[in-house]
Structure formats: C-alpha cells, structure tokens
Image: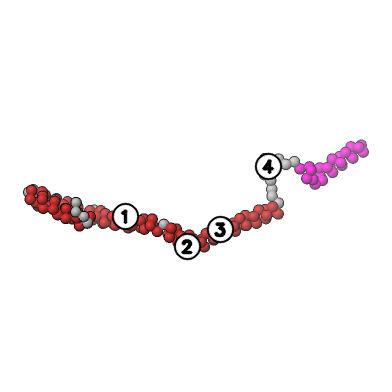
Amino acid sequence: MNPETVNNYTEESETRLRQPEEADIVVNDTEPKLLTPQKISNEASATTVEWQKYGEKIGNFLQDLPNYIGRIFTENKSLLGVLGIFFVALIAVKFPLAILCAINDLPFVAPTFQLVGFGVTAWFVYRYLVRASNRQELSTEIKSLKQQFLGEKS
C-alpha cells in the first residue's frame, strides 16, 4: 500500500465522520425548519399571554355590560317604548289569526262561519241599504261615531 493513499483515505474519512458545523449547513427554504424546544416554549407562553389579554377584555366587557345596557335604555327610552308597542301590537294581531286558522281547520266549522257571514251581510244590506231612510240613519250613526273618536264636528 502506498502511504499517501492511506493518508488521503484517513483524511477523507475524518471529514466525513466529523460533526457538521453551522457554517457547513446549507439552509434550503423549501424544507420545513424544526424549532428547538426553547422556541416552542417561548411561542406557547406568548399565545398564553395573548389569550389572557383577550380574557381580560371579555371580562371587562361583561363587567360593564349592565351599565352599558342601562345607558342605552335611558338614551333611547322613547324608541324602545315604540318598539315595545309595535311588538305587543304584532302579537295582538298574530295570536287571534293563529286561533282563527286553527279553528278553520276543524271540519264543518269553516262552512258554518261562511254561512254566518253570508247571513250577517244579508241582514246589513236589508237593514241599512235598501231604503233611503235607513241609509240616512246609517250615515247619522257613522257621523256620531266619527265625532266620538275624533272629538270634533266635521
């Protein structure tokens, strides 16, 4: 064996077996980078701190919520009153309509209501619209009701 060959072989083997240094490492941007345990713990504590800040903000908001709602109510008292009246009126209209729809679905009730309606209409026409004197009486009653509701003579 040639001594130069042996020396070259040992030098190459030493360079292959030695630990890579930071200067020898080539970073490829396409490969994922691994985080050291210290970096992971720092990021975890940072997210914990962020969550604590959000928790404090939510806690402060919930603590001030009764004052905020009370302030809105006092500033918009008339608007809330109007909305309340509108809501009650809506219920006052929807509830009887729902009852009538439920009754209308019962057998023989819908035809009975129609028969009663035709009878009342026929009576009203005969009572108030056939003769001129009765029409004048109806006109007088309408004017008196109008005066009662409006409070003035027209």
Q: Quadrant of residue 80?
A: bottom left
User: Disc 1 versus disc 4: distance between alpha carbons?
Assistant: 65 Å
User: Disc 2 versus disc 4: distance between alpha carbons?
Assistant: 53 Å
Mark 1 / mark 4, whichever is N-terminal: 4
Q: Nearer the viewer, mark 1 or mark 2?
A: 2
Residue at horizontal 28 percent and vertical 55 percent from the top: 93
Q: Quadrant of residue 29?
A: top right
Mark 2 / mark 4, whichever is N-terminal: 4
User: Disc 1 versus disc 2: distance between alpha carbons?
Assistant: 28 Å
Residue type, label 4: Glu
Mark 1 / mark 3, whichever is N-terminal: 3
The verdict on residue 5 being magenta is yes
**In the displayed structure, would residue 151 be above or below residue 8?**
below
Residue type, label 3: Lys
Q: Which mark is residue 57?
A: 3
User: Could you say where residue 126 lies in the image, as x and y percent from the top left?
Assistant: 9, 50
Residue type, label 1: Leu
Q: Which mark is residue 31?
A: 4
The verdict on residue 15 being magenta is yes
Q: Which residue bears the numbered disc 1?
A: 90
Rate crowding at label 1 as few (under 14), some (14 to 19) or many (20 or more) other CA atoms within 10 Å.
few
Q: Nearer the viewer, mark 2 or mark 4?
A: 2
Mark 3 / mark 4, whichever is N-terminal: 4
Q: Are marks 1 and 3 in contact (CB under 8 Å)?
A: no
Q: Which mark is residue 66?
A: 2
Magenta residue span: 1-25
Task: State how the image is colored.
Answer: secondary structure
